[in-house]
Image (tube, rainbow, N blue to C red):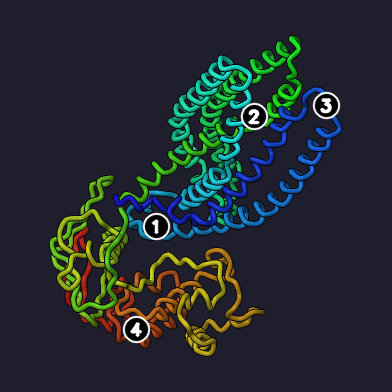
């Protein structure tokens, strides 16, 4: 696997923008901790009016600077993180689009949505972490402890290092559990998203109890795995809060003893009290950041499996001949073998493929498209192996998927086609009823085209394929589930507009077969050449 396959997570960072945001954050952190640190310098006896004016002045100036700094941070940091989140989504999609269909079919669609959502959330959290705040806090704290006592400094330093070490060790152990949690969350989201995306079917089945129980069952499993994960970082939090008290406790005890011996440590005591609460937040930030890194590591591990093999084939638009020789496609789950001894497609051929359902027609189509990688034999496009070259093929499949866009956008995608031309084709396919919508061809069809009937969606699917203007088309049962009249409309459209194209047609329609010059049929999962 190429290293760049999952490098998009941080690869697209704009270093200048991130550096600017970190500098603003560093400035704000310095100002924040500088104020309590000045207490150790000026809150000393005798506390004069001059000292009071200096302390108040520092406080007011620091407040003004923090207001201005926070404005800049929100303006630039928040905007950039939003922009970067969109970049991540785009780069993730680019990689996802390269996954072979054979691999992508192993996952439920919602899984990919959950992964990019988690990545975006974790990366934002990591980039927003106050690294400088952590560093500045330790510098001011240990500098003050060192000035009090070298022994106190050493003990506090060892305690803090131990705190960080144990936190990392516990959270590293928790990382194994988070991978198990993510696996279970995938099972849960698969069930949930499956029912949500097919909510109309769910309602038609009228069996809410089953679906609710199924969602609840998977949800409980996720909750149980999450409890195990939470147990780890809850223990880490308790241990951390105990250990971070040690430096402050020792520092305050030492300052109190010095004060009782007549040494002026009022400023030091004030410093410890004012910074203690913030120190808790700093360690919380550090712990949360470690958790985020480990969670991101777990997701990256998942991505390595998903992106371990990408489709990097060269896409070609034209060809002279496609050859399939001695093909054997095995399906281990059923011990099924589909065989194609010799299948040749020359440019401008019109090939009919027939056979009963389940014989291998869809497998043959997927092999030619390049969606099947596990097979024996040779698939050649102009003597180039299909594993090296991918032919740009227009597909009219039985599965009709429309996007939640307008009728025109669904038809044209990136093609610049006039409204008049689209309306002409719609009328020819007797889809003029779509023009009765208030917004006409600019009507949003809804998710998966829910506003349209099956017949309307099938005709739009055929028109869209034609408008993409490919050299070769595979028409997979283009007239299935259509009434006789609509079937005749579709057939006439195909005969008129696809006649100059190379066609591989999976059909039993006699009229479409009339234009074909080659005829094949599946018998006992073997493709054989037949007479017309």
Of residues 493 and 69, which is closer to you in this image? 69
* Disc 4: CA contacts within 10 A as few (<14), some (14-19) or many (>=20): some
Q: Is residue 454 visible?
A: yes
In primary-sequence order, the first of circles 2 and 4 is 2
**Residue 116, image x and y in percent?**
49, 50
Residue at position x 68%, y 26% in the image:
276
**Taking 428 as reference, is 196 left or right?**
right
Give the alpha-carbon distance from disc 1 to disc 4, as whole Å.
33 Å
Q: Which of the two discs, 1 and 4, sits closer to the camera? A: 1
Give the alpha-carbon distance from disc 1 to disc 2, as whole Å.
41 Å
In primary-sequence order, the first of circles 1 and 2 is 1
Residue under circle 4?
498
Of residues 421 and 158, which is closer to you in this image? 158
Element at label 4: loop
Of residues 159 and 353, which is closer to you in this image? 159
Tag of residue 279: 2
**Quadrant placement of the C terminus:** bottom left
* Disc 2: CA contacts within 10 A as few (<14), some (14-19) or many (>=20): many
Tag of residue 47: 3
Element at label 1: helix
Give the alpha-carbon distance from disc 3 to disc 4, as whole Å.
94 Å
**Residue 173, image x and y in percent?**
45, 26
Q: Which of the two discs, 2 and 4, sits closer to the camera? A: 2
* Disc 1: CA contacts within 10 A as few (<14), some (14-19) or many (>=20): some
Q: Which of the two discs, 1 and 2, sits closer to the camera? A: 2
Residue under circle 1?
95
Element at label 2: helix
């Amino acid at each position: 696997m190429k290293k760049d396959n999952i490098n998009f997570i941080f690869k697209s960072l704009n270093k200048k923008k991130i550096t600017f945001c970190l500098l603003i954050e560093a400035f704000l952190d310095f100002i924040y901790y500088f104020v309590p640190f000045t207490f150790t310098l000026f809150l000393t006896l005798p506390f004069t009016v001059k000292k009071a004016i200096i302390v108040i002045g520092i406080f007011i100036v620091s407040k003004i600077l923090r207001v201005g700094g926070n404005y800049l941070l929100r303006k630039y940091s928040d905007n950039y993180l939003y922009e970067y989140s969109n970049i991540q989504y785009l780069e993730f999609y680019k990689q996802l689009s390269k996954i072979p269909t054979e691999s992508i079919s192993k996952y439920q669609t919602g899984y990919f949505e959950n992964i990019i959502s988690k990545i975006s959330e974790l990366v934002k959290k990591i980039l927003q972490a106050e690294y400088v705040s952590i560093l500045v806090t330790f510098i001011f704290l240990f500098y003050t402890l060192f000035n009090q006592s070298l022994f106190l400094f050493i003990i506090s330093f060892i305690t803090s290092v131990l705190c960080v070490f144990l936190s990392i060790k516990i959270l590293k152990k928790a990382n194994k559990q988070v991978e198990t949690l993510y696996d279970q969350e995938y099972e849960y989201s698969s069930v949930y998203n499956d029912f949500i995306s097919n909510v109309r079917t769910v309602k038609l089945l009228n069996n809410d109890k089953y679906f609710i129980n199924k969602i609840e069952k998977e949800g409980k499993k996720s909750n149980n795995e999450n409890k195990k994960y939470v147990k780890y970082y809850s223990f880490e939090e308790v241990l951390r809060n105990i250990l971070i008290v040690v430096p402050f406790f020792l520092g305050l005890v030492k300052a109190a003893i010095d004060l009782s011996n007549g040494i002026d440590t009022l400023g030091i005591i004030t410093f410890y009290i004012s910074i203690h609460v913030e120190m808790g937040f700093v360690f919380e930030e550090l712990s949360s950041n470690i958790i985020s890194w480990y969670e991101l590591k777990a997701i990256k591990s998942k991505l390595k499996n998903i992106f371990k093999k990408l489709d990097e084939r060269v896409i070609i638009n034209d060809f002279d001949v496609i050859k399939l020789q001695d093909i054997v496609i095995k399906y281990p789950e059923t011990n099924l073998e589909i065989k194609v001894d010799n299948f040749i497609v020359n440019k401008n051929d019109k090939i009919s493929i027939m056979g009963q359902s389940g014989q291998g027609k869809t497998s043959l189509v997927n092999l030619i498209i390049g969606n099947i990688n596990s097979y024996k034999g040779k698939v050649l496009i102009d003597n180039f192996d299909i594993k090296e070259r991918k032919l740009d093929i227009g597909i009219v499949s039985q599965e009709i998927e429309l996007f939640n866009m307008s009728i025109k956008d669904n038809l044209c995608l990136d093609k610049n086609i006039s409204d008049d031309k689209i309306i002409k084709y719609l009328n020819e396919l007797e889809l003029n009823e779509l023009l009765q919508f208030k917004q006409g061809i600019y009507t949003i069809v809804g998710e998966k085209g829910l506003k349209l009937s099956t017949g309307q969606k099938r005709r739009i699917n055929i028109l869209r394929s034609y408008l993409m203007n490919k050299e070769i088309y595979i028409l997979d049962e283009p007239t299935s589930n259509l009434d006789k009249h609509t079937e005749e409309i579709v057939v006439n459209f195909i005969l008129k507009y696809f006649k100059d194209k190379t066609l591989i047609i999976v059909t039993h329609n006699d009229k479409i077969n009339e234009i074909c010059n080659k005829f094949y049929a599946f018998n006992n999962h073997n493709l054989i050449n037949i007479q017309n």
